[in-house]
Image (cartoon, helix red, strand yellow):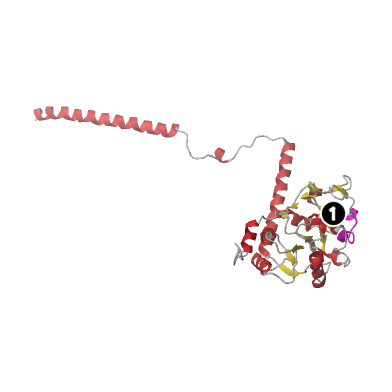
Amino acid sequence: MYHEATYSWPRQKQDMKHKNKYLSIGCIVLVVVVWLWLGTPSTAPTHADIVPKFPKVDPEFQNDAIRQRISELESEVQYLKATAATCRVHKNQLDPDVPVIYAITPTYARPVQKAELTRLSHTLMLVPNLHWIIVEDADDKTMLVANLLRKSDIPHTHLVAPTPKEWKRKEKEPNWKKPRGVLQRNKALEWLRNELSYDVTTDQGVIYFADDDNAYSLEIFEEMRKIKKVGVWPVGLVGGLMVEKPLLNQTTHKVAGFNSGWRPERPFPIDMAGFAINLGLLLDHPEAKFSLTVEGGYQESEILRNLVTREELEPLAEYCTKVYVWHTRTEAPKLSGEMQLRKKNMRSDQDMEV
């Protein structure tokens, strides 16, 4: 018995040593884990991390920044309103609460006709409450123009007004030699006067002569909706200058003159793209139209002299300091190869509309 007891005690003692050793190691590991857990900074974001710390800003600078942000937000609101109106104007629907822009475009058959009308139509598609009056210099309406209008889904009127042969410009004659677009613009004005029963209390509209060889920023169409009589603005790349523009009296902000580089003595030395007319004003003056017999470059003065004086012109585009329209003519294509084909009774655009 004693021997057995004496013999088992060392084994128990040895087992206890092993247990104590493992317990000590476990405690050390536990302490290290706890220390690491408590001592290491958390990666989770704290309140201080979430809430940004703004540096102290000078009050006057802060006011300028607020005013700038308000201006930006107002611009965004105007853009969203225009976008919403564009969404409403679909399938020839017009919004009675927004002034209608009647864009008048004379056009004639030429190699670049479809290209220029396509470019213009893609701009006009983005303009809310616009009615496009396109007038062909032709005896009959062409399928090219009819198809383009149908595909554009822009509210439109398609008219024709042929120019007599004696008034047509010959191939090598300069652009200014004979009046262009006169009968076509007058045809559009005639349509407006015959078709619209204008009520000044409910109807709001603007007439703009949008030639198909110009480039337009969308801002110009929103600007012209403000017009009470005749609005004016700068036009880029015209008359031998980078820009032609009305010159304003710095005190009254009224039009005091023009910086026209060509025939500045004209009553209204302005480009056709540089003005628009209130619909009611035009309908009240049936004598206001264009003429085949006036001197070259005087078409704008011919219609405007029957509507307003210089002092009554309304300067737009931030008091005529911004350019939103450019007189960009498309270069006539060189088609010598096509002419050679046609001599052989052939053509590259056979069964195609280019």
Q: Is residue 17 above or below residue 66?
A: above
Report x, y in % for residue 251. 89, 45
For the point 18% across and 30% down, the residue is 12
Question: In which image quadrant can residue 159 be found?
Answer: bottom right
Decide: few, some or many residues near mark 1? Use Cα within 10 Å; few <14, some 14-19, many ≥20.
Answer: many
Magenta residues span 301-314
Q: Is residue 155 magenta?
A: no
Q: Nearer the viewer, residue 17 or 165?
A: 165
Q: Nearer the viewer, residue 29 or 329?
A: 329
Question: Can residue 98 be spotted in the picture?
Answer: no
Question: Can residue 69 be spotted in the picture?
Answer: yes
Q: Is residue 22 above or below residue 285?
A: above
Question: In which image quadrant can residue 181 be found?
Answer: bottom right
- Residue bearing the label numbered 1: 314
Give the quarter of the figure containing the C terminus: bottom right
Q: Is residue 354 left or right of residue 59?
A: left
For the point 14% across and 30% down, the residue is 8
Question: In which image quadrant can residue 345 be found?
Answer: bottom right
Counting the numbered discs, the total is 1
Report x, y in % for residue 318. 79, 49
For the point 76% across and 57% down, the residue is 172
| Element under disc 1 | strand
Q: Is residue 311 magenta?
A: yes
Q: Is residue 120 above or below residue 25?
A: below
Report x, y in % for residue 126. 68, 59
Report x, y in % for residue 266. 89, 53
Q: Is residue 171 above or below residue 45?
A: below
Label 1 sits on what residue type?
A: Glu
Give the quarter of the figure containing the N terminus: top left
Q: Nearer the viewer, residue 24 or 199?
A: 199
Q: Is residue 7 left or right of residue 137?
A: left
